[in-house]
Image (cartoon, helix red, strand yellow):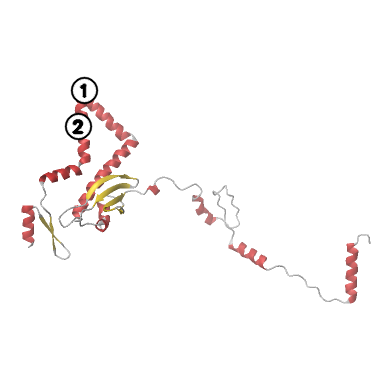
Amino acid sequence: MARTSRAQGRSGGRNSSRTSYRSGTIEIFTRPHQNPYLRVVGWIIRFRAELTCIAVILTITLVLRDHIGPANTALVLGFVTVMVIGVPASRRYVAARCWAVTTRHRMRACFGQTRTMTHDGKMPLLLWSRPSPVGERVRVWLPAGLSVKDIDQVTDRISTACWARTTRVTPVRAQAALVVVDVVRRDPLTVGDIVPTGIHDLADLTETRADEHITPEDTGNVVALPSRDTLTGARTTASTPPAEKKPGRTSGKNATARRTADDEDADPSL
């Protein structure tokens, strides 16, 4: 059966087989016969960015060659190339667009190698890819027979194929057949010093003594907390008021003498 399937796949181009090294089973994938003209149209759609760039460069070269000559045309094209590479803004723009096109091709290759396709051999259609703050964002249209779970199961392989950190799949609520795939290449939170001044000094507060006074100007409006012993002592003092001396019983002579002494202290004329 394996030889027959492989023979048909080589002769007719419709069947292909693969032997699993784990279980020894043979997986047969059947692809319908496609029109050669449709294949050419699909190839043109996939490589539309490269074909457009080549057509624009050839057109500009031929026009300049007729007006200013071959030597001056080479100088102009070389100067434009140096300016595009030398200016940081244009260099980043071109690099981001090149990565977007590369990601689209790598995702299609990953879908073909992982067999992320329907039983008829239809793979997801990559509609558009553009740069994003973390990498690239690709819009994928799923044919009948695939769902978001099929794309979510191969996210780790997409990351490997696109040389990225990770891949995130987000379904579109308005259309279940449309999926947004974010290929993450960098973390924007790690670029530059975005931590405000004063936060770095918080680590030094653990080594500061509890009774040391820290002004708000030194650590960015950060004041050290009082120690636990100080709070415990203050709480104990506030909860236990000082005991008052209760008046005791005295004899009549002592009471009369004390009352006389109090009267003398109250009246300064005596």
Task: Specify which label sits upstream in the sequence, 1 or 2.
Answer: 2
Name the spot of residue 205 as percent of width and height, x first: 53, 54
Amino acid on which the number 2 mark rests in the picture:
Leu
Residue appearing at x 51%, y 53% in the figure = 202
The answer to whether 94 is drawn above or below residue 61 in the figure is below
* Residue 240 occupies quadrant: bottom right
How far from the left and from the top, in percent, is residue 187? 36, 49
Foreground residue among 94 and 210: 94
Residue at the image position 90 percent from the left and 65 percent from the top: 263
**Do the numbered discs 1 and 2 sit on residues whose CB atoms are within 8 Å?**
no
Whole-angstrom CA distance, mark 1 to mark 2, is 14 Å
Q: Picture quarter containing residue 2?
A: bottom left
Secondary structure of residue under mark 2: helix
Q: Residue furthest front?
A: 174
Q: Depth check: give the residue in front, 36 or 159.
A: 36
Q: Position of residue 252 (x, y in %)?
A: 89, 76
Label 2 belongs to which residue?
58
Question: What residue type is disc 1 on?
Answer: His
Q: Is residue 162 visible?
A: no
Q: Is residue 128 left or right of residue 242?
A: left
Expressed as whole percent of the image width and height from the top left, the position of residue 135 reads 32, 47
Q: Is residue 264 left or right of residue 97?
A: right
Q: Quadrant of the C terminus?
A: bottom right
**Residue 202 as seen in the image, left or right of residue 93:** right
Q: Is residue 48 visible?
A: yes
Task: Look at 24% across and 46% down and name the residue there.
Answer: 127
Mark 1, Cα crowd under 10 Å, few <14 / some 14-19 / many 20+, is few
- Residues packed near mark 2 inside 10 Å, few (<14), some (14 to 19) or many (20 plus): few
Numbered badge on residue 67: 1
Numbered circle sitting on residue 143: none
Q: Secondary structure at mark 1?
A: helix
